[in-house]
Amino acid sequence: MSAPCMRVIVSVPGGIGNLGPGLDVLGCALTGARDEVIAEWSQTAGITIIDAGHPQLPTDPSKNTASIAAASVMRAAAMRGMRMSHPGIAITIKKGLPLSGGQGGSAASAVAGAVAANALIWPVGSGLTQNELLTCALEGEETVAGRHLDNIAPSLLGGIVLVRSLDPIEVVKIPAPAGLRIVLATPAQQLTTTRARSVLPIEVPRSIVVHQLAQVAAIVSACHSGDLALLGRAMDDRIAEPARTPLLPGFADAKVAAIDAGALGVSISGAGPTAFALCDSEATASKIVQAMQNAYARAGLDCTVRICEIDTQGAIVRDA
């Protein structure tokens, strides 16, 4: 094993949580924008934030997802008797993902903080297990978005992930079907996860629960078989999407426009306001981009749109 680094950089993808009907249990990582955490040893005890990455993000280490996750890793190391070369870690956060945008930004920062601290403390090839890292990142994410892993697990592992259980943690990677393209449309709006979760129904009729279970099962089957048409049909969320649509001006029109342009399925990314559309080619994706931008424009909203694929790398660590 090599000696621990003095400084590391960790890059982590965002993605889609609550993938279609998979509220809190299905998520995927996406290519493109990523969050980054630079971690280095410090003479100041605990975790220090050099730069939170955005003026709206807290510099108080007890309130930032990245620093909370990193502190959790430090505690785990101390409990194992790990002798660290310095009393603390200083982190610099670089935000590539939007705030309150429904692209897993808080989860990505939490994962980056946990992975960076882990890489700094332990020699390469040792350190916390996958589930231990998920636990530390979850501690950070829970402070701002609630206790769920559907964004955290894909950010760490890459790909499409099913969260079978939170206690104990068990996550299952699902193969990404070949040829899948994903259009992400982010209107000029912010919607906090707390607000989006507040409108979810407390009770759900049995018929809707059965429907949701069938769609989640169909997604797993479609990913294994590569059936993109089935994957699109399974993006039929009857719990979160109906409750959140009133909070998202332009979404309903954008969904119809995307389907008319050839999308296989459309739903809300995470808690919103970002929407996503699935398709099977770059040409169709380009048509969907224009259709969704036009739809949001009719609602008086500027919209940033990009074409993505499933990110299979997850968190990437490199020495600095």
Image (cartoon, grey):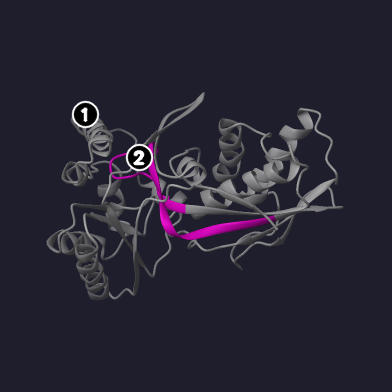
Neighbour tally class for label 2: few under 14, some 14-19, many 20 plus, Cα within 10 Å: many
Magenta part of the chain: 14-38
**C-alpha gap between disc 2 and disc 1:** 14 Å
Toward the top, the furthest residue is 168
Q: Is residue 76 left or right of residue 155?
A: right
How would you classify the magenta stretch by its main secondary structure? strand
Q: The C terminus appears in which quarter of the rendering?
A: bottom right
Query: Can residue 167 be seen in this snapshot?
Result: no
Q: Is residue 23 left or right of residue 120?
A: left
The residue sitting at 83% across, 40% down in the picture is 84
Q: Which residue is mark 2?
A: 23
Query: Can residue 175 be seen in this snapshot?
Result: yes
Q: Which residue is mark 1?
A: 210
Amino acid carrying label 1: it is Val
Closer to the chain start, of discs 2 and 1, is 2
Asked which quadrant contains residue 36, the reply is bottom right
Q: How many marks?
A: 2
